[in-house]
Amino acid sequence: MAERYEHLVRFSIPLRKRMAEFKWQPERPLEHLLQQLEIRGINVVADNVLSQEDSYSQPRFGLTVLCSGRPPLAYINLLKHNNSSCNELDAATLFDTVAHEAVHATAVALGRHEELPEKQDSDEYFLEEVCAHIGAGEINQRLGFPLQAQRNRFEANMFQLSLAQKTAFNVACARGIDAANYLVPR
Ligand SMILES: [Zn+2]
């Protein structure tokens, strides 16, 4: 995990700095969220190596790595959010990715996991994704992209179909709200 962490740090720069290279100012909701994450010691960085084409070919919009003794790292695939111009949709999807990864970044602080589950077909992995979707939806609701909030709730419901235990799903949803409360207190 330490190796992966170091690798991502080496090939990234702070998100704001990378956005500035594209003359993309964080909109108010994102600026607010980034400040909240800074206060909580969550390191938000953006890829600094991939070309736009390569970034589109990547499956992920972002990635979170938790490594013992290091601040949680939220790594954002920025070019994947930045089409030809900085329109509303890009701002909303970038905000959502940062919020989603930020929820994952709370896993240790809020006692969900010591490391994030990686096995993509495990219940543990899906439940952590449900938590991140619901938490990001709540953060969207509080800071400015309510349409995204609705979408996230809908997507989280899709996960429900693949889970045998409804209780586990509901617990994951509640943990998502806990994470939102921790990151963006009302
Ligand atoms: Zn996720």
Image (spheres, grey):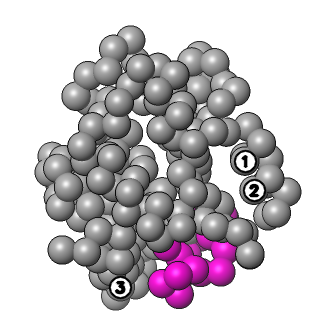
Q: Quadrant of the N terminus?
A: bottom right
Q: CA distance from mark 1 to mark 3?
A: 33 Å
Q: Is residue 20 above or below residue 41?
A: above
Tell me the amino acid under the disc marked 1: Val
Provide the secondary structure element on which disc 3 rests. helix
Work out whether mark 1 precedes mark 3 in sequence or the reverse, and give the earlier one.
1
Which residue is tagged 3? 171
Tell me the CA gap for discs 1 and 2.
6 Å
At which x and y percent is residue 107? 53, 76
Q: Amino acid at mark 3?
A: Val
Judged by depth in the image, the label closer to the viewer, 2 or 3, is 2
SS type, badge 2: helix
Q: Where, quadrant-wise, is the C terminus in this rendering? A: bottom left
Q: Is mark 3 within 8 Å of ligand 1?
A: no
Instruction: Establish if 91 lies above or below 101.
Output: above
Which label is found at residue 5? 2
* Secondary structure category for the residue under label 1: helix
Which residue appears at 53% of the width and 34% of the height? Answer: 17
Name the one closer to the observer, 124 or 148: 148
Q: Residue at x 51, y 40 (%)?
A: 15
- Tag 1 near tag 2, CB within 8 Å: yes
The magenta region covers: 106-124
Residue 5 in the figure: left or right of residue 92: right
| The residue positioned farthest toward the right in the image shown | 3
Q: Earlier in the sequence, mark 2 or mark 3?
A: 2
Residue that carries the numbered disc 1 in the rendered image: 9
* Residue 175 visible in the picture: yes
